[in-house]
Image (cartoon, rainbow, N blue to C red):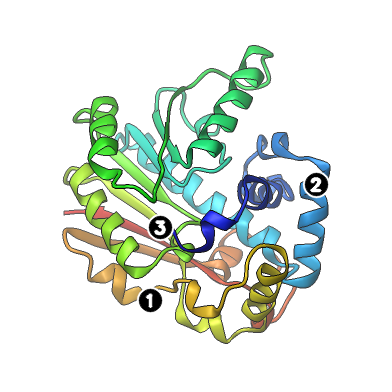
């Protein structure tokens, strides 16, 4: 899946958790700090210095938006199962109602590590018990038939919310199209998808140029064409889904009183979308 295969667990899931832990009042995630470690702290410091110092807040607001959105839908009886594609070390199961069923999907090495750590924290009463099903998937294989069977066994006919954040940027358009078609197969009418992605203008920003240089130095040699950006019209054109909400870093900063510290050219402005299946 793009360059993602060249990025280790440390460089993705750990770093995202560190960003979310930076401002718990903003992210509303008081468990992300459990993943902190010295190596990640050093990596994050370099990232914030060389790419964009605003990244901690963009990730906190991403977490806040999806967390609050899912909470409202759960409270309204519209969501019974949260299916998290590319779940990383996100901690939604412990931030949401205890009755929700969680399906956490990611690469096997990430899922296995997360499962072991959560089991340890639960046995030591650091985390509460939750109904979580972990599914490790090798995305380079023909995985969808097997994954669909596993999801259907867990979900049954229950209403669902599919979350995909921090993933589409590293996929090709063909892979993204395949995923959204797969979501359509999984879900019932009235179910929801939450998606995070960047728009085309990102690649003109200094922040993106800094990101590309940083990745080339730290991860793998890539070009701007290795990263996918998605315009609003893509979501509006998805078969069998309606786009019902769209936010970005600026709109959420206004909503949650987050003071923006950099100019637009130095911010990786992520966009957040809520889709409802027809």
Number of numbered discs on residues = 3
From the image, tell me which residue sits under label 2: 39
Residue designated by label 3: 195
* Residue 60 in picture, x, y percent from top left: 63, 53
Residue at the bottom extreme, as displayed: 204
- The spot of residue 187 in percent (x, y) is 22, 43
Residue at coordinates 36% horizontally, 42% vertically from top-left? 73
State how far apart marks 3 and 1 are (Cα): 12 Å
Query: Which badge, 2 or 1, is on the more N-terminal residue?
Result: 2
Q: 11 above or below 2?
A: above
Label 3: state its secondary structure: strand
Tag nearer the camera, 2 or 3: 2
Q: Nearer the viewer, mark 2 or mark 1?
A: 2
Residue 216 in view: yes
Q: Residues within 10 Å of mark 1 (few under 14, many from 20)?
A: few
Q: Quadrant of the N terminus?
A: bottom left
Note whether residue 187 is visible.
no
- The image quadrant of residue 71 is top left
- What percent of the width, then of the height, locates residue 76? 33, 37
Gap between marks 2 and 3 measured at Cα: 29 Å
Residue beneath the point at 55% across and 63% down: 252
Residue 231: mark = 1
Mark 2 closeness class: few <14, some 14–19, many ≥20 residues within 10 Å: few
Q: Is residue 169 left or right of residue 211?
A: left
Between the residue at mark 2 and the residue at mark 1, the CA separation in whole angstroms equals: 35 Å
Q: Nearer the viewer, residue 182 or 138?
A: 138
Q: Are marks 2 and 3 in contact (CB under 8 Å)?
A: no
> Quick one: SS at disc 1?
loop
User: Which residue is pictured at 48% across the width and 42% down the height?
Assistant: 107
């Amino acid at each position: 899946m793009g360059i993602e295969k060249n990025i280790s667990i440390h460089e993705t899931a750990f770093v995202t958790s560190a960003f979310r832990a930076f401002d718990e009042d903003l992210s509303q995630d008081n468990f992300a700090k459990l993943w902190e470690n010295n190596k990640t702290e050093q990596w994050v410091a370099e990232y914030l210095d060389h790419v964009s110092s605003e990244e901690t807040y963009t990730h906190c607001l991403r977490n806040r938006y999806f967390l609050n959105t899912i909470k409202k839908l759960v409270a309204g009886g519209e969501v019974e199962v949260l299916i998290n594609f590319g779940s990383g070390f996100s901690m939604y199961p412990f931030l949401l109602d205890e009755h929700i069923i969680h399906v956490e999907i990611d690469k096997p090495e990430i899922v296995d590590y997360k499962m072991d750590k959560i089991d340890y924290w639960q046995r030591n009463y650091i985390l509460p018990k939750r109904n979580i099903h972990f599914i490790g998937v090798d995305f380079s294989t023909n995985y969808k038939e097997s994954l669909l069977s596993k999801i259907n066994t867990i979900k049954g006919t229950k209403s669902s919310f599919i979350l995909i954040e921090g993933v589409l940027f590293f996929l090709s358009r063909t892979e993204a199209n395949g995923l959204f078609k797969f979501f359509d197969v999984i879900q019932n009418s009235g179910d929801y998808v939450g998606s995070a992605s960047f728009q085309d203008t990102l690649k003109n920003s200094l922040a993106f140029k800094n990101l590309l240089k940083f990745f080339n130095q730290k991860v793998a040699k890539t070009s701007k064409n290795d990263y996918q950006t998605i315009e609003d019209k893509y979501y509006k054109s998805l078969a069998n889904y309606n786009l019902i909400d769209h936010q970005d870093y600026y709109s959420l900063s206004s909503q949650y009183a987050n003071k923006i510290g950099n100019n637009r050219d130095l911010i990786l402005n992520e966009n957040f979308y809520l889709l409802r299946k027809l």
